[in-house]
Amino acid sequence: MTPASPSTGWRKPPSSRAAGCAAGTAAWPPWGLLHGDPGLAALAFESREEAYSKFRTRWATNPDLLAAVTVTDFPAAFRLRLQPGTDFPAVRARYENAAGVDRIVGRRCAKDAPVGGLQ
C-alpha cells in the first residue's frame, strides 16, 4: 500500500490518476469523504496493482488460479481502521451510496494487524 505519513497514519493515493481519477486525488469522492471522518483511525489506499501483487504472493503455489486472473480483476480500494467505539453499521450507512463507492466489506482484525489486514 502507499506509504503512510508516520504522524498521521493516512495513506493517500499516489497520483491524481489513481483508480481512474482524472481530476486529482482530493477531488476523488471517496478520498475527500473518508479523509475528514473522525471515526477513522487510519486510512490506506491500495492500488489494483498492489492487490494483484498480494494475491500472486498469497497464491504462489496455485499456478492454475494465478493463470486465471489478471490485474484488471482487482479493484483499487481504501482500507480503513475505525476508532475504538466507532459503529461499523453507521460508517457503512454514511458511505455505501457515495459517488465512487462500489462496495463496502467489513471484518474484524486483530488490534495489531496492519490497516487492511494481511500484508
Image (tube, rainbow, N blue to C red):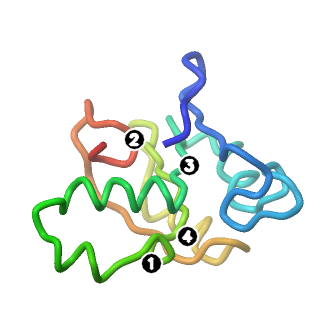
Q: CA distance from mark 3 to mark 4?
A: 20 Å
Q: Earlier in the sequence, mark 3 or mark 4?
A: 3
Q: Earlier in the sequence, mark 1 or mark 3?
A: 3
Q: Is residue 15 left or right of residue 111?
A: right
* Residue 12 percent coordinates (x, y): 65, 41
| Image point (25%, 53%), residue name | 57
Q: Which residue is mark 2?
A: 115
* Residue 10 percent coordinates (x, y): 59, 34
Are discs 1 and 3 less than 8 Å apart at CB? no
Q: Is residue 91 above or below residue 35?
A: below
Numbered tag placed on residue 73 in the rendering: 1
- Image depth: mark 1 or mark 3 in front: 1
- Image depth: mark 2 or mark 3 in front: 3
The crowding category of the residue bearing disc 3, from other C-alpha atoms within 10 Å (few below 14, some 14 to 19, many at least 20), is many
Q: Which residue is mark 4?
A: 93
Q: Indicate the amino acid at tag 2.
A: Val
Q: Which residue is mark 3?
A: 45
Image quadrant where residue 3 sits: top right
Label 1 SS: helix
The crowding category of the residue bearing disc 1, from other C-alpha atoms within 10 Å (few below 14, some 14 to 19, many at least 20), is few
Q: Indicate the amino acid at tag 1.
A: Asp
Q: Earlier in the sequence, mark 4 or mark 2?
A: 4
